[in-house]
Amino acid sequence: PTPVDFASAKSSVRDKALVEAFESFYASASPAAEVYEWSADDKADKAQQIEDAKGRLAFTLEMIEETEAELEFMKANRTTRDTSVSDIKEAYPDIAEETEKEIEERKWFKDVMEISCAIQ
């Protein structure tokens, strides 16, 4: 920091002795430099947090990649008025299998009933 201008303070302050006391204290004071040491426990905790964040980042990037692939699949298999049931069954075999099972077991409104019961 810039040095204190005690001369201007002496001319504007009534108590010159007070300014002189501050000036002598300022000239003689040599405070030790403040040094901070990072504790080993805190350092280990922060390192663990960084490793955890890297793991979450890898998981998030993997999820983004999978979601982008799923979006591309959905865009490629977009349904239109010309889409047949066979086309949907080919694009989504898991849903087709579940639907066939529900038809065989005569549970046509299984999902609708679950939703309406949950709403009430």
Image: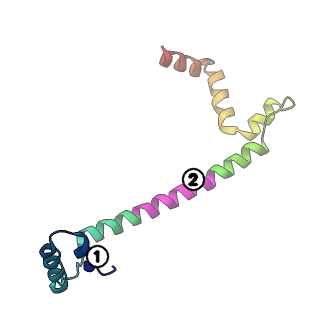
Q: Residue at x 24, y 79 (%)?
A: 35
Where 103 falls versus 53 (above or below)? Answer: above
Give the prevailing secondary structure in the magenta stretch.
helix
Give how far apart the Cα atoms at labels 1 and 2 are. 66 Å
As displayed, is residue 114 above or below residue 75? above
Give the residue pinned by disc 1: 8
Give the amino acid type for the residue marked by disc 2 in the picture. Answer: Met
The residue that appears at 35% across and 69% down in the rendered structure is 47
* Residue 83 placement (x, y as % from top left): 83, 32
Residue 30 found in image quarter: bottom left
Q: 81 or 52: nearer the eye?
A: 52
The number of numbered discs placed on residues in the rendered structure image is 2
Tell me if 61 is positioned left or right of 20 in this view: right
- Residue 13: x percent and y percent? 21, 69
Question: Circle 2 is placed at which residue position?
Answer: 63
**Residue 56: in magenta span:** yes
Most distant residue in the right direction: 82
Q: Is residue 66 left or right of residue 6?
A: right
Circle 2 packing at 10 Å, graded few (<14), some (14-19), many (20+), is few
For the N terminus, give its image quadrant. bottom left
Q: Secondary structure at mark 1?
A: helix
* Segment colored magenta: 52-66
- Residue 104 horizontal side relative to residue 9, left or right: right
Q: Position of residue 113 (x, y in %)?
A: 55, 16
How crowded pointer 1 is (Cα within 10 Å; few <14, some 14-19, many 20+) is rated as few
In the image, 50 versus 104, the foreground residue is 50
Q: Identify the amino acid type marked 1.
A: Ser
33 displayed left or right of 69: left
Which tag, 1 or 2, sits closer to the chain's start? 1
Colouring used for the render: rainbow
Quadrant of residue 48 within the rendered picture: bottom left
